[in-house]
Amino acid sequence: MSATILSAAITFALGALALAMVFATIRILGGPRAQDRVLGLDSLYVNTMLLFLTLGIRNGTAFFFEAAIVISMLGFVATVALAKFLMRGEIIE
Amino acid sequence: MTHLDTLPLWAAIPAAAFLVLGSSLALIGSFGLLRLRTFYERIHAPTLGSSWGTAGIVLASIIVFSVTQSRPVLHELLIAGFVTVTTPVTLMLLGRAALYRDR
Amino acid sequence: MSRILPHPLLSLGVVIMWLLLNRVSPGHLVLGAAVALVVGQAMAALEPSRPRIRRWDKVVVLCVRVVLDIIVSNVAVARIILGGGRAGRRAGFVEIDLDISDPTALAVLAVIVTATPGTAWIDYDAAHGRLLLHVFDLADPEEWRETVNQRYGRLLKEIFE
């Protein structure tokens, strides 16, 4: 009974997060400006991290947790670097 | 899914509720990212996923692992803390970059 | 005390993080404490400004208030995105003259404001103490000035200054 409830919730969560990743990807591809793409990338990273946490619950292992923490750190560094680049790129122009 | 079978019902229901809540908020946030019209409006959308979207899934994970391993498993709190501290930094930098490019 | 442990809060945080990432056991406590001591020394070498928390009871009040506000604004923003929001909603910038000037208090305020859906910290002009805030559902700019300065600013002032 409890396994049924939980696996239904996990399936829902996986679907919702995958759809959220699709939306973020559309924003990355669609732009229209560079800052929109960077914002989409940041959102994609957060959604991927949440997806990994959910997969960790489903499989009952802590390995996904470590992957999730690496993803969130990479996402942070990538977004900061890109935001910095957006400001500097204009200065050079 | 053997480890989920050992979970008692009183733990499965809140865990499932938090999972659904968290993933729905993350989905709504990304939907807003797609739907809203200007960049400055869009900057508000991902905070849904990074505030209670993350909190919901982290709480579900804590409940499931703490009950199945019958000891407090709290390392997910690190992710919640990390996301809470880093999201403002990225959004602030992005907002400033956008403002700079618009001026 | 201050020679061995220049940043007690930071070192405590490192020990807690170490124990969470590994297992809670005496061995890991010793190892984590060793790492925390080194991290504290390394931080002291960077000579950052040292934040001082004066009122611990107010920290609890602030945390409760922020968590409640985040829940409320999550619901509000989700509702607007899904289309059930008020007609005639408009988003816009607000300029706020902040009462607080302590760097740590400002950093905490920035985290609170941005972590709450519906408000985003865009720019801060340190020379004039003026904050540029973007608000998702801007009905009355005066109300937001009140909210930021009274609801959070006063508490932060009591905690840090």
Image (cartoon, coloured by chain):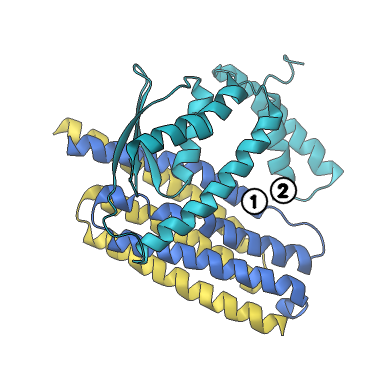
Chain colours: A yellow, B blue, C cyan
Nearer the observer, disc 2 or disc 1?
Answer: 1
Q: Is residue B15 above or below residue C160?
A: below
Q: Which residue is mark 1?
A: B77
Are discs 2 and 1 both within one chain?
no
Residue B30: assigned label: none
Give the SS element for disc 2.
helix
Q: Residue furthest top?
A: C3
- Separation (CA) of disc 2 from disc 1: 9 Å
Point 48% across, 27% down: residue: C106
Question: Residue C99, how many percent across, how many down?
Answer: 45, 21
Based on the displayed image, in which of its 4 quarters is residue C124 positioned? top left
Query: The disc numbered 2 marks a residue on which chain?
Result: C
Confirm whether residue B78 shows in the render. Answer: yes
Q: Are marks 2 and 1 in contact (CB under 8 Å)?
A: yes
Q: Amino acid at mark 1?
A: Leu
Q: Chain of mark 1?
A: B
Q: Vertical placement of A48 versus C5: above or below?
A: below
Instruction: Check disc 1: other Cα within 10 Å, few if <14, some if 14-19, many if 20+.
Output: some
Residue at 54% in and 19% down: C48
How far across and how far down the image is residue C36, in percent? 70, 31
Residue type for callout 2: Leu
- Tell me where residue C136 appears, x and y as whole percent: 34, 49
Q: Is residue A69 left or right of residue C24?
A: left
Which residue position is annotated with label 2? C20
Q: Nearer the viewer, residue C9 or C89?
A: C89
Is C156 located above or below residue C101 in the figure?
Answer: below
Residue farthest to the left? A93
Quarter holding the C terminus of chain C is: top right
